[in-house]
């Protein structure tokens, strides 16, 4: 009889503990979601739908001057210049319209072969 009582009380304790921790977890999630919804509502109403912080955007100065770092030396500067030239060259190559260039070359080759064929035919006559 004592084993049944201990088993029942152990089940009650386990169920109560699981219920308590589940309710705490749900409560924390609810607080987090409520906070995120309030922030989203504030952003939508005060920043997106109205221009309330337009002054902030007009007077905004990026902090790019703070993140300045000095070069290690002349060699690093030369490497950076070389890399910039290589990147510029690769971007130029990628910007070419290879299909149009191929069509133009094909048309010019056809013109040259037509001229050559006309000149050969004229010589034979």
Image (cartoon, rainbow, N blue to C red):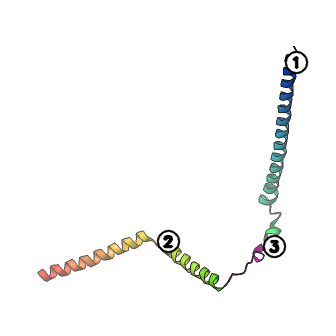
Residue 20 on image: x %, y %: 86, 34
Magenta span includes 124 = no
Q: Is residue 5 left or right of residue 108?
A: right
Q: Tag 3, which secondary structure?
A: loop
Which residue of the protein is positioned furthest toward the left in this rendering? Answer: 125
Q: Quadrant of residue 5?
A: top right
> Residue 5 — which label?
1
Provide the residue designation for mark 2: 94
Marked residue nearer the N-terminal end (1 or 3) = 1
What secondary structure characterizes most of the magenta part?
loop
- For label 1, count other residues whose C-alpha is less than 10 Å away and answer few (under 14), some (14-19) or many (20+): few
Report which quarter residue 54 is drawn in: bottom right
Give the labeled residue for mark 3: 59
Residue at the top extreme, as displayed: 1
| Mark 3 vs 2, N-terminal side | 3
Q: Which residue is pictured at 28% across the width and 74% down the height?
A: 110
- In terms of depth relative to the viewer, which is nearer, 39 or 45? 39
Which residue is located at x 33 percent, y 72 percent?
A: 106
Q: Is residue 5 left or right of 101 when viewed as pictured? A: right
Q: Magenta span covers which residues? A: 58-73
Which structural element holds mark 2? helix
Q: For the residue carrying disc 2, how many other residues have a C-alpha within 10 Å: few (<14), some (14-19), or many (20+)?
A: few
Residue occupying the point 58% across, 79% down: 84
Above or below residue 61? Residue 12 is: above
The N terminus - image quarter = top right
Decide whether residue 61 is among the magenta residues: yes
**Residue 74 x %, y %:** 65, 86
Q: Is residue 112 left or right of residue 92?
A: left
């Amino acid at each position: 009889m004592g084993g049944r009582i201990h088993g029942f009380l152990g089940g009650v304790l386990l169920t109560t503990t699981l219920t308590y921790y589940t309710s705490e977890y749900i409560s924390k999630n609810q607080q987090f979601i409520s906070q995120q919804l309030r922030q989203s509502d504030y952003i939508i109403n005060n920043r997106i739908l109205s221009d309330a912080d337009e002054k902030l955007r007009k007077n905004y100065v990026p902090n790019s001057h703070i993140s300045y770092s000095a070069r290690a030396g002349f060699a690093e500067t030369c490497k950076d210049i070389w890399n910039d030239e290589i990147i510029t060259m690769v971007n130029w190559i990628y910007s070419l319209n290879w299909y149009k260039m191929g069509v133009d070359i094909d048309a010019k080759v056809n013109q040259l072969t037509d001229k050559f064929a006309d000149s050969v035919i004229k010589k034979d006559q």
